[in-house]
Image (cartoon, rainbow, N blue to C red):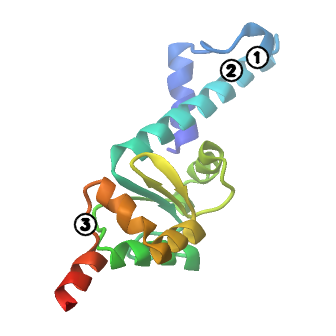
């Protein structure tokens, strides 16, 4: 069952249209549908907020870290791997179209992959690559208590 269906079921059970002024909801049979859709959209945004807060590093990619399904997702996985970041949450947007669309709305960023560090949206592949090249990614990882493997390798080579 996908996120939208689960969210709709929770809203229907709770009878929830709370937080939506009645003037925003049309009267009649359509109001029930509108309330469900508004509730589901809000629930998806709340779920996504919880997902990005759950782990220090969170990525939304096409495929999995073991088998990325696009070059940009693969690049994100490889950059994290180069820095020795193995403990991160990865969500495959190809498994759930609601997740795929929801994360784009949540971040207001139109493309996948999307990277979150300490619950903060960083950007996509291009931004992560830029941070990697400039050394900013090492700094951000350090702030989170993650030692970059590249720094460790550099120390060992000296």
Label 3, label 2: how many angstroms apart (C-alpha)?
A: 47 Å
Earlier residue among tags 3 and 2: 2
At 41% from the left edge and 55% from the top edge, which residue is drawn? 58
Residue 150 in the image: above or below residue 47 = below
Q: Where is residue 17 in the image (x, y as percent from the top left)?
A: 62, 15
Element marked by disc 1: helix
Rendering quarter of residue 78: bottom left
Element marked by disc 3: loop
Rendering quarter of residue 85: bottom left
The furthest residue to the bottom? 157
Q: Name the residue tied to disc 1.
A: 31
Q: Which of marks 1 and 3 is in front?
A: 3
Q: Which of 134 and 146 is in front in this view?
A: 134
Q: Do the residues labelled 1 and 2 touch (CB within 8 Å)?
A: yes
Q: Name the residue tied to disc 2.
A: 35
Label 1, label 2: how many angstroms apart (C-alpha)?
A: 6 Å
Q: In the shown orientation, is residue 23 left or right of residue 106?
A: right
Q: Which of marks 3 and 2 is in front?
A: 3
Residue 92 is marked as none
Q: In the shown orientation, is residue 13 left or right of residue 151?
A: right
Q: Name the residue tied to disc 3.
A: 147
Q: Where is residue 91 in the image (x, y as percent from the top left)?
A: 45, 57
Residue 34 in the image: above or below residue 64 = above
Q: Where is residue 118 in the image (x, y as percent from the top left)?
A: 39, 48
At 52% from the left edge and 51% from the top edge, which residue is drawn? 121
Q: Do the residues labelled 1 and 3 touch (CB within 8 Å)?
A: no
At 59% from the left edge and 71% from the top edge, which residue is drawn? 126
Q: Can residue 88 be seen in this view?
A: no
Rendering quarter of residue 31: top right
Residue 125 in the image: above or below residue 91 = below
Element marked by disc 2: helix
Label 1, label 3: how many angstroms apart (C-alpha)?
A: 52 Å
């Amino acid at each position: 069952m996908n996120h939208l269906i689960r969210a709709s079921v929770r809203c229907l059970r709770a009878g929830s249209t709370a937080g939506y002024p009645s003037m925003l909801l049309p009267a009649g049979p359509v109001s029930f549908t509108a309330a469900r859709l508004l509730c589901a959209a809000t629930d998806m945004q709340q779920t996504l907020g919880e997902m990005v807060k759950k782990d220090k590093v969170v990525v939304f990619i096409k495929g999995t870290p073991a088998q990325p399904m696009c070059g940009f997702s693969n690049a994100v996985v490889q950059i994290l791997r180069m820095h020795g970041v193995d403990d991160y949450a990865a969500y495959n947007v190809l498994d759930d179209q609601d997740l795929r669309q929801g994360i784009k709305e949540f971040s207001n960023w139109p493309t996948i992959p999307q990277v979150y560090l300490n619950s903060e949206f960083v950007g996509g592949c291009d931004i992560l690559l830029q941070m990697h090249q400039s050394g900013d990614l090492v700094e951000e990882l350090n702030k989170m208590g993650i030692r970059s493997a590249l720094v460790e390798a550099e120390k060992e080579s000296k």
